[in-house]
Image (cartoon, grey):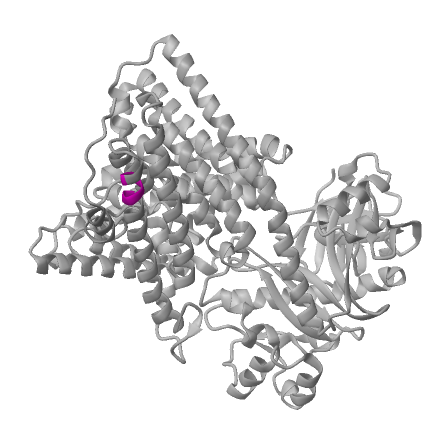
C-alpha cells in the first residue's frame, strides 16, 4: 500500500497516482468513515509521484484517516507510524502516567525494595523483563482465546495464573542457567507476584482493547517507569536515612512523604505530548 | 500437616486488625489502593467493603481446604481461591453498583495481588479452624476499611470540601490533596500519627522502616 | 513465603501428576462457579445500564411518561474500498451508499426492535446484510429519538471523546433545530475533584441552549466562572429546559464560551471538542437517515 501522511494541520502528502480532480477524492476519519471531509484541492507535490491534498478540516497526526480516489483500487491508510505510536505509549506509561507516582500501583513492593540503590536496580530490571513477558503472553491469551470464546470473566484468574507460572518458570530457568544471577535476583522474582502492576498491565491492555504494539508499549513503559521510580526513591531514601528524622516519622512515614514529593514533580509530565 | 491452635479471643482479633496490626498503617501491606482510591469517602468505602468481603471469604475457604491441599501447592491454590472471590465480587459490583464501580473497578480486580489477604491465609487460616478465621479476616478487613475511609475522609474534606459527595465547605481548600502526591502525604501523616499514639502508650516503634513487607 | 517452597525437595513424578490434577480440578470448579455467576449478573448489569440510560434520556429531553424512546444504531459495511452505511431504526433496516442512495430497506421484526441488548440487534443485522465476511459489518455508533405519539420530540446522540485519563462517553440532547438541550456524562475515569467535575451541573450545563452556529465557534476559556452564571447553571435540572432557557436568555449570550474546570483544562477541552464533532457529524448524518425515522 502506498504511503500517505499528515504533514500539516490541513495537508496530507500522498504517494502514488491521484486524479487532479478534488471531487474524485474521498477523505474520511476512520472512526467516522461515513462522513467525508471537505477536500479543497489536489496539487502535485515537490517529491516525484506525490500529491498534496488540502482540506478545510483540521487534521491531527494522531488520528486515523482513509483516502480513496475514483479509478484507484487501493485506499490509502493514514495513521501515525507504528514506531511513533510505541514510543508515545512507552513514554506515556513510564513518565506521564507513571505506574507508581501517578497511578499508585506497585507500592507494596516499592517501599520494601527501595531501601538501597542495588536492590532497587535489581528489582527494576527483573520486573521490567518479567512484566514485558507476562504482558505480551497475557495479551496473546486474551486476544486469541478469552475474547473470541467470550470468557472475559476469567481474565483475573488467567492473568494471575500466567504471572505465577512465568515467575516460577523464570526462577527455575535462572537457577539452572545462571546460578550467580539467580542468587542476585532470585528473591525479587517472588515479590513480583504480589506486585499490583504486574496484574494491572494485562488488565489495562484488555479493557482498552490494545493492539499488540500498544500492549508492548504499555508493558515496557510500566516496567521502565517502575524501575525509574525505584531508583529515584532509593537515592533519596539512602540520603534521608542518614539525616535526623523525627521519631514518629522514621521509616515508612517519611518514605511516603518523599514519594509524595516525587509524585508532585512527576505531575510536571502531565501535559507532555509526543508528537 | 497443620493442627488447629486455640484461637485468641474474638475481641483481640478484631482490635488487632484495627490498630496494632492495621494492614495499611502498620503492616504497610496492600498500599496501592490506600493511595489510589481514597480520593473520596465513597470510593474508599466501596473498595474497603469489597476487600473486607474477599478477605473474610478467602480466610474462611483457606481454613476449610487446608487439610485437603498438598502444602507444596498451597500458594497457587490460595491465589486461585482469592481470584475466584475477586472475580465474583467484580461481577456483582459491576452489575449492581455501576457508577462507583467505574472509579474503583481496576482496584477491585487488583485485590487478587494484595499481599494482605494471602499473608493472612498463610499466617492464620492454615493454623486455625473456620470460625476464628472468619473473625481474623473480619478484623483485618475492618482495619483496612477504616483505614480507607479515614484517609478518604481526610482527602475529600481537604481537597473537595465535601464528605460522601455532600458539600460541607463552600470551597475547595487544598486541591493538591486529591492528587496522587496528596495521597502519599496523607498516608505518611496518618502513619506518623499511629506511631505517635504508640509512643504515647509506651510501645516500641517498628521504625527504621521495619514495617514494610512484600 | 514462597522462599520456603523453593527450599523443599522437588516433587516426584507421581506427586506432580496428583498436584497437576488437583490444580486442574480446582480451576475447572472455579471456571464453573464464575461462569454461573456471570450468567446471572450479566443480564442484571445490562438491565441496570439500560435503565440508567433511559432515565438520562427522558430527563434530557423532558419527555412525558407516555413518550417512547427509539434507538437508532449505525453500522458500516466495508468491502475492499467500498463503504456502505447501515441504519437500524424503529421502522427499517436501511442499507445505503454514502451519498444516501438506497441499496436495500428491510422491515424490522418486533422482537429485535424491543431487544434491550445492543448485541442481539448487531447479530440480527449481520445476518441480514450479505457480506463476504460478517466482520465486515461493524457497529459504528447510535443515537436515540424521543417520540411523543409518533412525532420526534428531540434526539439524544451518544458521543465519545478522549479525556485526560481514558475515554469519556456522553449523551447530548438536541432538538430538531440542532440546538443543544443538555449534556450528560455517562462514563469516565477522570480524577475526583478535577476531571470528574465534568459531571457537575456547573460544567455540563454550559452547553445547554447553544445553537448549532454557537457550538461551531465555541472555545474553552480559563477565565473564572461568573457567580451569577453558575447560579443559573445549577438550576437546569430542577427546571425543565425550555423554561430555563426562557429565564436566562439574556445571560446566555454574555457567556459565549465554555469556562474550564479549575485544574482540568484537558478534560474540559475534551468534552467541548467531543460535543462539537458529535453535533456536526449528527447534522450531516440526519440528512441521510432522517428519511427512515
Asked whether B135 falls inside the magenta stretch, the response is yes
Asked whether B31 falls inside the magenta stretch, the response is no
Residue B170 in the image, given as x and y percentages of width and height = 41, 80
The residue depicted at 46 percent of the width and 36 percent of the height is B84
The residue depicted at 49 percent of the width and 68 percent of the height is C264
The residue depicted at 74 percent of the width and 73 percent of the height is C64
Asked whether B158 or B181 is in front, the reply is: B158
Q: Is residue C79 above or below residue C191?
A: above
Which image quadrant for residue A171? top left
Helix, strand or loop: magenta stretch:
helix
Residue A174 in the image, given as x and y percentages of width and height = 34, 21
Which image quadrant for residue C91? bottom right
Count of marks placed on residues: 0
Residue lying furthest left in this view?
B202
* Residue C259 located left or right of residue C141: left
Quarter of the image with the N terminus of chain A is top right
Q: Tell me which segment is drawn in magenta.
A: B132-136
Residue B16 in the image, given as x and y percentages of width and height = 21, 49
Asked whether A250 or A232 is in front, the reply is: A250
* Residue A59 located left or right of residue B98: right
Q: Is residue B65 above or below residue A79?
A: above
Residue C233 in the image, given as x and y percentages of width and height = 58, 81
The residue depicted at 68 percent of the width and 58 percent of the height is A59
- Asked whether the viewer can see residue C74, the reply is yes
Asked whether A45 or B52 is in front, the reply is: B52
* Residue A21 located left or right of residue A116: right
- Asked whether the viewer can see residue A73, the reply is no
Asked whether C282 or C54 is in front, the reply is: C54
Amino acid at each position: 500500500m502506498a504511503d500517505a501522511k499528515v504533514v500539516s494541520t490541513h495537508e496530507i502528502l500522498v504517494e502514488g497516482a491521484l486524479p487532479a480532480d478534488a471531487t474524485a477524492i474521498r477523505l474520511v476519519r476512520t472512526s467516522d468513515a461515513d462522513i467525508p471531509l471537505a477536500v479543497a484541492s489536489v496539487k502535485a507535490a515537490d517529491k516525484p509521484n506525490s500529491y498534496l491534498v488540502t482540506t478545510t478540516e483540521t487534521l491531527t497526526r494522531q488520528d486515523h484517516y482513509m483516502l480513496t480516489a475514483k479509478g484507484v483500487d487501493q485506499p490509502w491508510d493514514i495513521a501515525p507510524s507504528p514506531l511513533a505510536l510505541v514510543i508515545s505509549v512507552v513514554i506515556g506509561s513510564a513518565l506521564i502516567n507513571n505506574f507508581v507516582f501517578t497511578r499508585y500501583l506497585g507500592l507494596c513492593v516499592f517501599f520494601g525494595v527501595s531501601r538501597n540503590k542495588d536492590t532497587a536496580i535489581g528489582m527494576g530490571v527483573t520486573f521490567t523483563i518479567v512484566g514485558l513477558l507476562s504482558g505480551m503472553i497475557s495479551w496473546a491469551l486474551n486476544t486469541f482465546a478469552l475474547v473470541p470464546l467470550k470468557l472475559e470473566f476469567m481474565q483475573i484468574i488467567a492473568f494471575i495464573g500466567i504471572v505465577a507460572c512465568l515467575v516460577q518458570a523464570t526462577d527455575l530457568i535462572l537457577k539452572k542457567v545462571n546460578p550467580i544471577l539467580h542468587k542476585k535476583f532470585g528473591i525479587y522474582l517472588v515479590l513480583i507476584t504480589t506486585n499490583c502492576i504486574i496484574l494491572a498491565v494485562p488488565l489495562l491492555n484488555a479493557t482498552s482493547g490494545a493492539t499488540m504494539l500498544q500492549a508492548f508499549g504499555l508493558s515496557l513503559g510500566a516496567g521502565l517507569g517502575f524501575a525509574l521510580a525505584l531508583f529515584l526513591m532509593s537515592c533519596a531514601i539512602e540520603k534521608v536515612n542518614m539525616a535526623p528524622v523525627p521519631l514518629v516519622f522514621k521509616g515508612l512515614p517519611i518514605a511516603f512523604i518523599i514519594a509524595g514529593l516525587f509524585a508532585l514533580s512527576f505531575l510536571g509530565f502531565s501535559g507532555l505530548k509526543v508528537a | 500437616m497443620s493442627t488447629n491452635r486455640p484461637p485468641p479471643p474474638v475481641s483481640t482479633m478484631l482490635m488487632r486488625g484495627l490498630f496494632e496490626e492495621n494492614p495499611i498503617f502498620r503492616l504497610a501491606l496492600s498500599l496501592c489502593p490506600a493511595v489510589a482510591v481514597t480520593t473520596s469517602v465513597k470510593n474508599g468505602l466501596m473498595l474497603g467493603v469489597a476487600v473486607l468481603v474477599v478477605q473474610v471469604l478467602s480466610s474462611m475457604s483457606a481454613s476449610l481446604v487446608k487439610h485437603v491441599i498438598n502444602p507444596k501447592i498451597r500458594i497457587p491454590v490460595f491465589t486461585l481461591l482469592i481470584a475466584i472471590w475477586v472475580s465474583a465480587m467484580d461481577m456483582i459490583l459491576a452489575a449492581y453498583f455501576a457508577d462507583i464501580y467505574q472509579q474503583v473497578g481496576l482496584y477491585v480486580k487488583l485485590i487478587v495481588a494484595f499481599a494482605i489477604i494471602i499473608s493472612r491465609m498463610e499466617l492464620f487460616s492454615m493454623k486455625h479452624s473456620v470460625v476464628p478465621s472468619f473473625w481474623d479476616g473480619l478484623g483485618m478487613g475492618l482495619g483496612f476499611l477504616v483505614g480507607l475511609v479515614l484517609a478518604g475522609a481526610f482527602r475529600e474534606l481537604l481537597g473537595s470540601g465535601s464528605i460522601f459527595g455532600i458539600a460541607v465547605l463552600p470551597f475547595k481548600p487544598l486541591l493538591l490533596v486529591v492528587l496522587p502526591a496528596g495521597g502519599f502525604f496523607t498516608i505518611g501523616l496518618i502513619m506518623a500519627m499511629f506511631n505517635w499514639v504508640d509512643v504515647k502508650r509506651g510501645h516500641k516503634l517498628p521504625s527504621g522502616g521495619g514495617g514494610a513487607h512484600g | 513465603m514462597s522462599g520456603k517452597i523453593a527450599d523443599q525437595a522437588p516433587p516426584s513424578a507421581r506427586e506432580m501428576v496428583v498436584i497437576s490434577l488437583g490444580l486442574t480440578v480446582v480451576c475447572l470448579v472455579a471456571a464453573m462457579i464464575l461462569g454461573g455467576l456471570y450468567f446471572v449478573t450479566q443480564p442484571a448489569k445490562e438491565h441496570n445500564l439500560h435503565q440508567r440510560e433511559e432515565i438520562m434520556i427522558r430527563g434530557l429531553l423532558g419527555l412525558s411518561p407516555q413518550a417512547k424512546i427509539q434507538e437508532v444504531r449505525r453500522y458500516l459495511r466495508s468491502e475492499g474500498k467500498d463503504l456502505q452505511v447501515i441504519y437500524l431504526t424503529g421502522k427499517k433496516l436501511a442499507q445505503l451508499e454514502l451519498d444516501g442512495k438506497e441499496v436495500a430497506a428491510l422491515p424490522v421484526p418486533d422482537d429485535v426492535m424491543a431487544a434491550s441488548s445492543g448485541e442481539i440487534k448487531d447479530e440480527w443485522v449481520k445476518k441480514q446484510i450479505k457480506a463476504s465476511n460478517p466482520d465486515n459489518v461493524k457497529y459504528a455508533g447510535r443515537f436515540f429519538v424521543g417520540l411523543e405519539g409518533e412525532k420526534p420530540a428531540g434526539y439524544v446522540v451518544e458521543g465519545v471523546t478522549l479525556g485526560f485519563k481514558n475515554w469519556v462517553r456522553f449523551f447530548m440532547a438536541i432538538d430538531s433545530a440542532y440546538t443543544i438541550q443538555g449534556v450528560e456524562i455517562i462514563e469516565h475515569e477522570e480524577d475526583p475533584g478535577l476531571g470528574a467535575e465534568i459531571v457537575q451541573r456547573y460544567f455540563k450545563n454550559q452547553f445547554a441552549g447553544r445553537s448549532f452556529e454557537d457550538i461551531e465557534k465555541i472555545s474553552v476559556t480559563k477565565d473564572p466562572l461568573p457567580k451569577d452564571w453558575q447560579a443559573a447553571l445549577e438550576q437546569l435540572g430542577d427546571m425543565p429546559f425550555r423554561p430555563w432557557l426562557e429565564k436566562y436568555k439574556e445571560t446566555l449570550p454574555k457567556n459565549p464560551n465554555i469556562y474550564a474546570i479549575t485544574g482540568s483544562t484537558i478534560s474540559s477541552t475534551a468534552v467541548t471538542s467531543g460535543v462539537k464533532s458529535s453535533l456536526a457529524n449528527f447534522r450531516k448524518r440526519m440528512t441521510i437517515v432522517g428519511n427512515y425515522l
